[in-house]
């Protein structure tokens, strides 16, 4: 390469995986890194929130907007007052974000909780 950096790498020869010639243009490389531990952490935190919502539904109605908002408010209060759960949720939000949480929560109050978690996360700067 005559001492200069190039974004294009040319390879040829037999590589043992059935490739005789190949090239890799590093400008076109992309993809997603899937960290199994982060996914598990996210799923576990979301599962805890899901269970929490189901418990709160026994006390507050989930068939009205007010009830859903009350469930979400109580859920956020409980998460915020439990340091271990709080940290798991913060870590899960860092790992997967709000949209990932949305995929795991299935409850009538979930959209309110997601909105509250998003606002809560942003306001705490974590």
Image: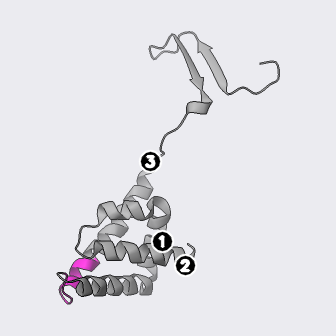
* Residue annotated with mark 1: 90
The reply to whether discs 1 and 2 touch (Cβ–Cβ < 8 Å) is yes
Identity of the residue drawn at 44% across and 57% down: 38
The image quadrant of residue 57 is bottom left
Indicate which disc residue 124 carries. Answer: 2
Q: Position of residue 74 (x, y in %)?
A: 33, 87
Dot 3: what SS? loop
* Disc 3 to disc 2, C-alpha distance: 26 Å
State the residue position of label 3: 34
Q: Quadrant of residue 102?
A: bottom left
- Expressed as whole percent of the image width and height from the top left, the position of residue 80 reads 44, 84
Q: Position of residue 110 (x, y in %)?
A: 29, 72
**Quarter of image, res 37:** bottom left
* Residue 97 in the image: above or below residue 9: below
Cα distance, mark 1 to mark 2?
Answer: 10 Å
| Mark nearer the viewer, 1 or 2 | 2
- Residue at (43% x, 72% y) in the render: 89
- Mark with earlier residue (3, 2): 3
Q: Write the start and end of the magenta stretch as one range.
A: 52-62
| Mark carried by residue 74 | none
Query: Could you tell which of marks 1 and 2 lies nearer the N-terminus?
Result: 1
Q: Residue furthest bottom?
A: 59
- Number of other residues with Cα within 10 Å of mark 1, as a class: few under 14, some 14 to 19, many 20 or more: some
């Amino acid at each position: 390469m005559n001492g200069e950096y190039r974004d294009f790498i040319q390879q040829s020869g037999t590589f043992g995986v059935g490739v005789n010639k190949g090239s890799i243009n590093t400008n076109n490389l992309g993809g997603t890194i899937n960290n199994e531990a982060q996914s598990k952490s996210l799923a576990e935190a979301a599962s805890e929130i899901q269970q929490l919502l189901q418990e709160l539904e026994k006390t507050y109605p989930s068939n009205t907007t007010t009830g859903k908002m009350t469930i979400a408010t109580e859920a956020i209060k409980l998460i915020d007052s439990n340091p271990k759960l709080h940290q798991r949720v913060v870590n899960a939000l860092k790992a997967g974000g709000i949209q990932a949480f949305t995929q795991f929560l299935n409850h009538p109050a979930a959209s309110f909780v997601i909105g509250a978690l998003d606002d809560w996360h942003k306001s705490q700067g974590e």
